[in-house]
Amino acid sequence: MLRMIGVSARCLLGCGLALAMIALSASPQAKGYKQLYAFHGGSDGSHPQYNLLLNKGDLYGSALYGGALGFGTLFRLTPDGKETTLYSFRGIGSGDGAYPGGPPVVDKAGNLYDETFEGGTGSCFGGEGCGTVFKLAPDGTETVLHAFRGGSDGASPDESVILDDKGNLYGTTEVGGSGKCSYSGYPPGCGTIFKLAPDGTETVLYAFRGGSTDGSDPSGNLVADTSGNLYGTTTLAGGTACQGFGCGTVFKLAPDGTERVLYSFCARAGCSDGADPIFTSLFMDRKANLYGTTEFGGSGTGCGSGKGCGAVYKLAPDGTETVLYSFCSLSQCSDGDYPDSNVIVNRKGDFVSTTAGGGAHGFGALFGLSRHGAETLLYSFKSGRDGASPNASVIADPKGHLYGTTYAGGSGNCTGGCGTVYTLGE
């Protein structure tokens, strides 16, 4: 699915998981939940939708909306909950961008880098701009490194960028490029993978073509291995299920520009293998196994989507896919449903992530998945002060404390709350 602004869905460590479909563990919810910050919906921003960055003890992130003109912010949060708006986007017609992605990345000099989904100088979306990649200096100076034009260079960069040791940035755009895909209201093209040099020179490394042997609408951050191969997911194409658009792929891009689809989802009956890896990034272990989530698919049946309630999967280097857990396998989806964020590995070697819905109260959940396949509900959001709809995954500090955001809930002037930043102990 293409991201619709305003509509909520959304390290290399060794870890082995066995194939299992085991019921929710009887363990109690993890203790130590604490709200660090509740957005007000004004100059501080609203609706954080992406992962956080932990840098020198502080948390950095983006709010999709709010700020001085309503086009989003980049913020810093201290451990004691003091929030500082680092930059407020001016949006349409300003050239600096609108609706920031995330999480930001940081270089050795303390500069932050990220993307905006719209804004810039392109003519997409009725003149609202085709998105940007930007740099934010420690003194608060924002520099647009590249403003997408909506043609062969791509449009609507999704999620964030990754940074190599030479200062090059790598990312994806949802649309644009030279492919023949066409989505109503969006620039033509099936999306791109791009490289941005430190001086802002953009190189399109690959333009998706769509269809059963390729992907389209790449989403989520890229992952790189030690040989320079890039890995990622596309939301659409690859196979013919899912209304003919395809149910998404996992792909590999070699340094010579050769793209290969490693797996196309909905390859098994009822999409039991997963479908639509929307906005999710991959995790790679030391043996080059890839792990991720799909928002739909799996063998759960209680969420009413018609094609499953989401899954956690493992993809071996030879392309063998294993479903590690299917959501909504318990009554009323109390184990969670619709995961649309990446997984991380905690100090115990277990996977941790979030689901945007389900849980004990129906407003999303933070879950753990053991290497033996047992799922544990770590926290279930109540849509009150604690937050709702955790579209983003979590990050962990060296002591094992988890940090994340919720798109809604909390307090503020937004309907349903303006979102929160929270922490949870092991």
Image (spheres, rainbow, N blue to C red):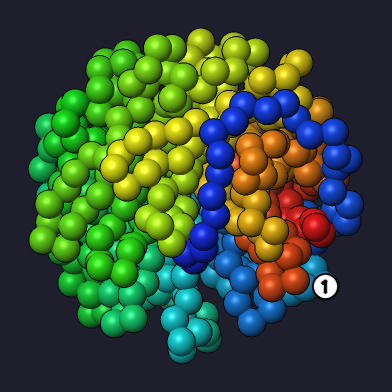
Q: Is residue 211 above or below residue 36?
A: above
Q: Position of residue 409 (x, y in %)?
A: 76, 41
Of 343 and 98, the residue lying toward us:
343
Residue 68 appears in the rendering:
no
Q: Is residue 333 above or below residue 125?
A: above
Of 168 and 231, the residue lying toward us:
231
388 left or right, relative to 275: right
User: For numbered disc 1, what is the local secondary structure?
Assistant: loop
Q: Amino acid at mark 1?
A: Asp
Q: Quadrant of residue 185?
A: top left
Q: Residue at x 80, y 42 (%)?
A: 379
Q: Quadrant of residue 56?
A: bottom right
Q: Residue at x 76, y 16 (%)?
A: 331
Q: Residue at x 75, y 30 (%)?
A: 24
Of 271 and 233, the residue lying toward us:
271
Dot 1: few (<14), some (14–19), or many (≥20) neighbours within 10 Å? Answer: few
- Residue underneath mark 1: 80
